[in-house]
Image (tube, rainbow, N blue to C red):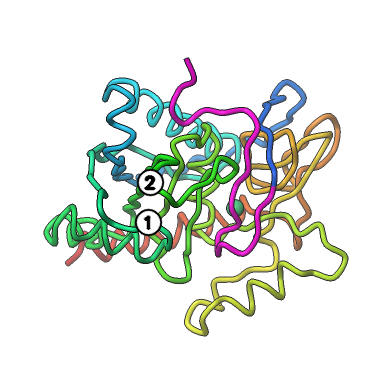
Amino acid sequence: MKKLLSIQTLIIAFCLSLTFIPLVYKVDVPGMTLPLCEEAEAVETPIHFFVSRTIADKWSMDEIEASIKASVRKSNLTMKNSCIPMKRIVACVEVVDFSGRPLFDIDQIRRYLWELIGEDKVEQIYAKPNQFYGAVLAIEDGYFDYDVLGTTNPDEDSQFFMLSEHADEYTLEHELGHLSWAWHEDTSWFQVLDDTLEKHTSEVNKQRLKPYARGYHCGGAGTIMSYEVDILPVYSSPEVSNNGRECGIADRADNARQMREFAEQLRQKMKSYSAT
Ligand SMILES: [Zn+2]
């Protein structure tokens, strides 16, 4: 039986829904060399999962929760491998019924979700900057094709993501990476990704775009934000290597640095939150 949140030959949508990139996930961990991490207390990031009724009609809650937990475990492995002091935890898994609502646009879907879960819950999520929430949708819900696994629009909302029922264990962290302003590897000749991000990011968020926040490939595989066929549970970093090849470049491909900086900013925000 094919499990929810697992599939072998898939595609992840570019965050701003601009393009589609094929990915096949196979982990080749034995060739990886990882850095020794500095001791740091991890910032917790609770994640609220809202699963479409269409999925809940096909799978038991135990199966759905097991798949979500497997994704969260993979996220935390990726954090650990990348020396990022953040810890993903499951805040809740709830079923929502989108029936009768046309699900074509991520921002509209987010607003529908607000209606379904209620104002109090929405306020509770946005009250803390370390929280993320996502809609998990079935193909029949209309938004996802079989070749799209997840999407985000961090310029519009940096706490919301969407996952397909066919998303695999890496997709959650890939999308959360985007919400932390980590991006794909730019394999084009003319820095198309740089230009695209600059063009589609609002002025207020432009300072969040960093030239080093890009994925990378190394030793026949790619880091979690890359387009490579084989994916490693690690963010790009020159301190990581795979089969003898560095998995990043300091000024061009160091998503681990971006994520560590994001974690530190989150830690500071949470201190201010606790102090109020
Ligand atoms: Zn992506």
Whole-Å distance between the Cαs marked 2 and 1? 7 Å
Give left or right: position of 221 versus 141: right
Question: Which percent across, then down, holds residue 58?
Answer: 33, 26
Determine the main secondary structure of the stretch shown in magenta: loop
Question: Which percent across, then down, holds residue 194?
Answer: 71, 71
Nearest to the observer: residue 139 or residue 165: 139
Vertical order, 118 against 6 (above or below): below
Q: Which residues lie in the magenta part?
A: 1-21
The verdict on residue 17 being magenta is yes
Vertical order, 14 against 76 (above or below): below
Question: Which percent across, then down, holds residue 1?
Answer: 47, 14
Q: Quadrant of the C terminus?
A: bottom left
Q: What residue sits right under mark 1 in the picture?
A: 103
* Residue for point 34% across, 21% down: 63
* Residue for point 86% across, 32% down: 244
Give left or right: position of 79 versus 43: right
The verdict on residue 8 being magenta is yes
Q: What residue sits right under mark 2 in the picture?
A: 141
Residue type pointed to by label 1: Leu
Give left or right: position of 168 versus 187: left
- Could you say whether the residue bearing mark 2 is in a helix, strand or loop? helix
